[in-house]
Amino acid sequence: MAIRYTLWLDPDDTPRHRAVEADLERYFLERFADYPHIRLFGADPYDYDAPFNRLHDVLMARAGEYCEREWRYVPTPEQLNRAFFLAVGRSNKFVRDDDDGDPHRSGP
């Protein structure tokens, strides 16, 4: 299998990698704006049919295609995932369930 990830093929092009990663985060934030409030997973974060998990899968695929089309850049799965969750953290579109499995968060 051939290596396709731009980061791996040209690790020293740090300015380009950072620019793509920043654009990916912006890309995700813009996509989140297309949805009403998104409920984060509840007690079972591994429920792959949960709306958040389906959204993650769809947006990962679209973001990869976006990078290849707009930047001629193939992001690593880690770059995509990090940008996605940075955008989740910055977005006001996400609502956490009361029972979200976070032991540090007290209930209502």
Image (cartoon, rainbow, N blue to C red):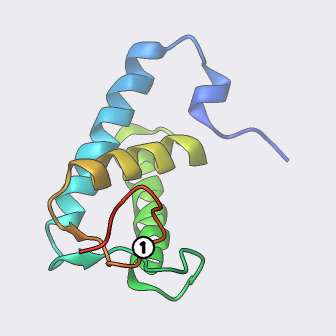
Image position, residue 10 (x, y; %): 60, 19
Image position, residue 27 (x, y; %): 26, 51
Direction from residue 19 to residue 94 in the image, left or right: left
Residue 41, relative to residue 29: is it above or below? below
At horizontal 49% and vertical 70% (from top left) the residue drawn is: 101
Residue 38, relative to residue 6: is it above or below? below
Q: Residue furthest top?
A: 12
At horizontal 39% and vertical 52% (from top left) the residue drawn is: 84
Image position, residue 6 (x, y; %): 58, 32
Q: Nearer the viewer, residue 6 or 55?
A: 55
Q: Residue furthest right?
A: 1
Q: Residue furthest bottom?
A: 49
Specify the quadrant of the image occupied by residue 74.
Answer: top right
Direction from residue 4 to residue 30 in the image, left or right: left
Answer few, some or many: residues within 10 Å of disc 1's Cα (few below 14, many 20 plus, some between 14 and 19): some
Tell me the quarter of the image containing the C terminus.
bottom left
Q: Residue type at mark 1: give it.
A: Asp
Q: Nearer the viewer, residue 2 or 34?
A: 34
Q: Secondary structure at mark 1?
A: loop
Residue 76 in view in this figure: no
Q: Nearer the viewer, residue 6 or 90?
A: 90
Direction from residue 43 to residue 108 in the image, left or right: left
At horizontal 44% and vertical 73% (from top left) the residue drawn is: 58
Residue 101, relative to residue 10: is it above or below? below
At horizontal 46% and vertical 43% (from top left) the residue drawn is: 82
Q: Nearer the viewer, residue 90 or 65?
A: 90
Q: Which residue is mark 1?
A: 100
Residue 52 in view in this figure: yes
Residue 30, relative to residue 3: is it above or below? below
